[in-house]
């Protein structure tokens, strides 16, 4: 693999946000084990997704990217995976039908096990331990044993991702994603909400349309299965490097841990290890851009990560915060568009809008999330560019982590079912509500 920099040289660049492993030998053993594991995804699937993202950058499709803030090993159950898939299918069908635009479906799933943190250490009641960096690195439980970074967990990430992908593939090809299922995706507790009733109406319309199509003898494959791809943040160098392989068809390197990988806001240093590794792989990739990003930063990242300006290769995922998007985003989009750079613009309305509730829970206001998406659409409309998609942290469960929305969750409700090990996620009803609001914006776009 001469075309890919080796691990030592990547670490020499000063890779940000890496775990501090106490035992180098154990790290080498885990990496060696991972190098022998079969690919989780195939290079050809990555190329298919790249073609779909090229359509997004041309303004012919819309990207829906969503899933957990941080997956956990305990969360790899059939129910949990199905629930996440179900809410994404519901959102996609709302966006497709209500906005008449093809929707590219990308799960934040089967690999989202590592998290960047603002501080290396965490102190509670006088005890200081390493911060929890996701199940890929250490345990959530606040004890010295649990918090020691363990490289064996990287092998567990592989197995958990494989199990998750296996379930997802079975669901999307085995009839669960069939459009005739639109009603069954709407389970009881959603159906009772106003947005659930709105969904039922839409499902009835879809059912009528399908019946009509069947009556005239049209029953395309697309009615029975969906294309669904996986994505995660490329964070832990050892894992992503070990999962990078040379494709036998093209002799080009792909990171086969997921179809789409992104570089986080905290690791997008132009001369850093993450940009260096990802510029060598042929997957479609993304970069998170926060409010400190200058237009020149964006141009330099595009030049480094997509020097051939290949359509579908690069996605910019903006995370400004509801209060900053309208003033911060136009300069970026304007300069990038003027430079002729081929990129898909996607809105992450989650990461710039986190605050601490009076109860001590980390939360987000649903209104802020919607306001950021609205700002994103308004900026693109004013500039004549295409608002290419949304990137959301959500769960398939009835959790209480973000305040507001149609159910009007208040800060006092957060303790009822706060299950995230990291950031607050939209629950199913809030996710569905978001998709209806975005569909309205798309119709105008």
Image (cartoon, rainbow, N blue to C red):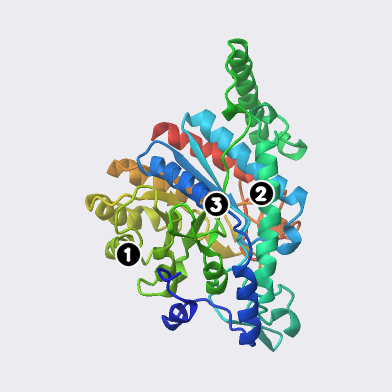
3D distance between C-alphas at marks 3 and 2? 31 Å
The quadrant where residue 384 appears: top left
Residue behind mark 1:
304
The quadrant where residue 196 appears: top right
Q: Earlier in the sequence, mark 3 or mark 2?
A: 3
Residue 195 seen in the figure: yes
**Residue at 49% of width from left, 77% of height from top?**
7
3D distance between C-alphas at marks 1 and 3? 24 Å
Instruction: Check the image and name the residue furthest to the top.
Output: 216
Instruction: Check the image and name the residue furthest to the left.
Output: 338
- Tell me the quadrant of the picture where the C terminus can be found: top left
Q: Secondary structure at mark 3?
A: loop
3D distance between C-alphas at marks 1 and 2? 37 Å
Q: 68 or 325: nearer the eye?
A: 68
Horizontal arrangement in the rendering, residue 16 relative to residue 307 (left or right):
right
**Residue at 45% of width from left, 58% of height from top?**
321
**Residue at 76% of width from left, 57% of height from top?**
416
Question: In front of the other: label 1 or label 3?
Answer: 3
Q: 41 or 265: nearer the eye?
A: 41
Residue behind mark 3:
42
Q: Secondary structure at mark 2?
A: loop
Residue behind mark 2:
427
Horizontal arrangement in the rendering, residue 444 relative to residue 352 (left or right):
left
Is there CB contact under 8 Å for labels 3 and 2? no
């Amino acid at each position: 693999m001469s075309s890919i920099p080796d691990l030592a040289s990547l670490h020499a660049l000063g890779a940000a946000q890496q775990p501090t492993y106490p035992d180098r030998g154990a790290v080498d053993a885990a990496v060696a084990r991972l190098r022998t594991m079969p690919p989780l995804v195939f290079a050809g699937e990555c190329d298919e997704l790249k073609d779909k993202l090229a359509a997004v950058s041309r303004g012919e499709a819309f990207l829906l990217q969503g899933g957990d803030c941080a997956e956990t090993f305990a969360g790899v159950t059939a129910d949990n995976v199905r629930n996440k898939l179900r809410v994404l299918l519901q959102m996609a069908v709302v966006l497709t039908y209500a906005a008449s635009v093809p929707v590219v479906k990308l799960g934040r799933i089967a690999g989202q096990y590592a998290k960047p943190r603002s501080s290396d250490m965490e102190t509670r009641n006088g005890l200081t331990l390493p911060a929890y960096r996701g199940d890929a690195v250490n345990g959530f439980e606040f004890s010295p044993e649990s918090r020691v970074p363990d490289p064996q967990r990287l092998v567990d990430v592989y197995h958990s991702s494989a199990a998750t992908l296996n379930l997802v593939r079975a669901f999307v090809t085995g009839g669960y994603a069939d459009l005739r299922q639109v009603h069954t995706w709407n389970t009881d507790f959603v159906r009772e909400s106003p947005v659930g009733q709105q969904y039922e109406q839409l499902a009835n319309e879809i059912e009528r349309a399908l019946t009509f199509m069947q009556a005239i003898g049209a029953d395309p494959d697309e009615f029975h299965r969906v294309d669904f791809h996986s994505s995660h943040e490329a964070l832990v160098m050892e894992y992503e490097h070990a999962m990078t392989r040379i494709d036998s068809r093209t002799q080009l390197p792909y990171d086969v841990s997921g179809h789409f990988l992104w570089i986080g806001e905290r690791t997008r240093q132009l001369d850093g290890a993450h940009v260096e590794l990802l510029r060598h792989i042929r997957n479609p990739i993304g970069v998170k851009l926060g409010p400190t990003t200058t237009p020149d930063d964006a141009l330099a990242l595009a030049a480094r990560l997509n020097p051939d300006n290949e359509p579908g290769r690069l996605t910019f995922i903006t995370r400004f915060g509801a209060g900053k998007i309208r003033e911060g985003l136009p300069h970026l989009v304007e300069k990038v568009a003027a430079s002729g750079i081929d990129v898909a613009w996607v809105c992450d309305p989650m990461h710039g809008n986190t605050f601490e509730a009076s109860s001590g829970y980390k939360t987000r206001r649903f209104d802020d999330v919607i306001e950021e998406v609205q700002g994103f659409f308004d900026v693109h409309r004013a500039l004549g560019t295409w608002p290419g998609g949304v990137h959301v942290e959500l769960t398939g469960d009835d959790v209480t982590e973000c305040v507001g929305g149609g159910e009007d969750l208040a800060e006092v409700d957060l303790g009822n079912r706060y299950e995230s090990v990291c950031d607050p996620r939209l629950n199913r009803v809030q996710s569905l509500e978001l998709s209806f609001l975005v569909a309205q914006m798309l119709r105008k776009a």
